Image: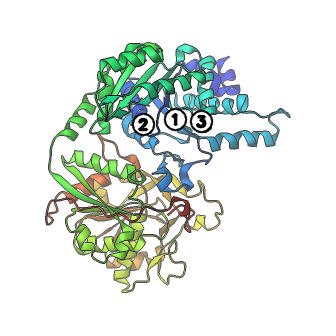
Amino acid sequence: MFPDITKRFPYVIRTILLMTKYIFVTGGVVSSVGKGITVASIGTLLKSRGLTVSVQKLDPYLNVDPGTMSPYQHGEVFVTKDGAETDLDLGNYERFIDTELTADSNITSGQIYSAVIAKERRGDFLGGTIQVIPHLTTEIKDRFKKLAANSGADVILVEVGGTVGDIEGQPFLEAIRQMRNDVGRDNVLYIHVTLLPYIGSTKELKTKPTQHSVNELRRMGIQPDVIVCRADYPISEGIRDKISLFCDVERKAVVPLPTVSSIYEVPLVLEAEGIGNLLVDRLGLKAAVPDLTAWQHMVSCHSQSCEEVNIAVVGKYIELEDAYYSVRESLRHAGLSHNRRINLSWVHSEELEKNNDVEAQLRNVQGVVVPGGFGIRGIEGMIKTARYARENNIPYLGLCLGMQIMVIEFARLVLKSNKPNSTEFDLETPYPVIDLLPEQRSVAGKGGTMRLGNYTCHMQPGTRAAEAYGQDACVVLERHRHRFEFNNDYRKQLGEAGLIYSGLSPDGRLVEICELRDHTWMLGCQFHPEFGSRPNRPHPLFNGFIGAAAKVLREGSQPVLPIFAEQPDFGSQQSGLSGQHE
């Protein structure tokens, strides 16, 4: 009986049979209050109790996904294993919970409206009038239930992007309100994360904005079960009592979350406040005794003072560090593995184009990372960086664009010309050492059309890349996001000059990793290893890179001062040849 029903109504019936629990997390007072880290941390606490968890992010913007958005506006685009371009919060979810997510885990208003309109055009609604309620809200709820059915998780954590009161987020709030009736009140729990602002003149934290935020949430029909209070100062017992009274939330469900030195401390802070047991009890979950031993050890290592290693990240979006969020965290993970504190310098590649004294910016660093990006702006500054790293035997890690930069710079050396380039930056170059993927030549649309998601890479034995992964790891899966590739017309010539192709696609056609033969550690990869790094398990290439950098002795120990270009005019950012924002 049940198999036939689940085929006809897969999301609803399977969810009921699985008894999935839902935790919905909203934010109040201001944006960027820390909902994403809170959600990721709660996922860590539930998983430490032997429960299976999956996570979903609701973004209220009308873009279908962030893939075509400027990094200055949205920060990093995180790519899932199945090739979805998603919000950077999914990276935090994966790093904290150590679970690979899929396209099901990021929902935007653009996706919801597009899906409903497509159904209307097909005639699915039989001539009915299409409205926010019930059509949009039903589509949203179906996405919750789809994730529950596909993941089989005990608990689905859902973060509602934006702030309560935003007009564009109202359909999402109405949908999570309706879920209480759809799956039963005992299977749904609401958490509200708010800010307690500090007033310097009176030296006190204020609760009134939180009260107003909760009132706004109630106006939408949602009474929070838990309030997580963010603050830059300690939260007194009196403040907790006041919030409990005025917001009608049980005293122990008012959870303080003061600012900490590392985001990885947050799960331990929340566990100490009892939120893990509170959620298990409220939802009636059968959970084991929490085991956070490994997490506590990792945080302890992070907080201990240790020798620094100076790393420069040379990019074009450094005014907003969130554009390189996963890169930054991956470097820190590798630093923990080597008992080193990563001292990061953010160097603007566009400034290096104007300033010929690269030595002044990089003379103290022990390693250089050139991350991904699109468009010609700042490219020559990156090429100068690659040349400096090669000539001075400084460890270099090139990520996607960073690999292409490394190839261009080496080709200019080998071919004794400044003309080698990528056709992304110079369509007329006589030496197109980087060129458009053949399957991309007929692509017209820009959103979601790159080479995206997991692809297999075959390692070449005896290379630095193979050593980093471990000699037994001859085949690896890595996440991609690119349109351009190494041009095989130059493979033989550059190979004879010292470029080693240490990772290839299964058919040998695509160069996935390359490295320099006559260098301590200079390696570039066409994929994005930063998406696969974890606090307790750094990505092998980052681990190898930091291991090499830690051995380098450079003049001085002070951090390189970052240089910043003028703040960009966000409204004037134009997409490059690749269709992504520069």
* Sequence-first disc among 1 and 2: 2
Disc number at residue 528? none
Quickly name the residue at label 1. 163
Question: At numbered mark 1, what does the secondary structure look like: helix, strand or loop?
Answer: loop
Residue 33's disc is 2
Q: Give the amino acid type for the residue marked by disc 1 in the picture.
A: Thr
**SS for callout 2:** loop
> Compared to 85, does 206 lie above or below?
above
Q: Earlier in the sequence, mark 3 or mark 1?
A: 1
Pointers 3 and 1 in contact (C-beta within 8 Å): yes
For disc 3, the neighbor class at 10 Å (few under 14, some 14 to 19, many from 20) is some
Is 564 above or below relative to 479? below
Reading the chain from its start, which is encountered first: label 3 or label 2? 2
In the picture of the structure, the residue carrying the numbered disc 3 is 169
Question: Where does the image place residue 492, in percent across and percent down from the top left?
Answer: 41, 77
Q: What is the CA distance from the residue labelled 3 to the residue labelled 1? A: 8 Å
Where does residue 538 sit, x and y in percent of width and height? 30, 46
The answer to which quarter of the image holds residue 577 is bottom right
Mark 2: give few (<14), some (14-19) or many (20+) Cα within 10 Å.
many
Contact, mark 1 vs mark 2 (Cβ under 8 Å): yes
Q: Answer whether residue 67 is visible to the viewer in this image.
A: yes
Write the residue at 39% across / 49% down: 325
Q: What is the three-letter code of the residue carrying label 3?
A: Gly
The quadrant where residue 537 appears: top left
Residue shown at 35% from the left, 46% from the top: 533
Amino acid type assigned to the residue bearing label 2 in the image: Val
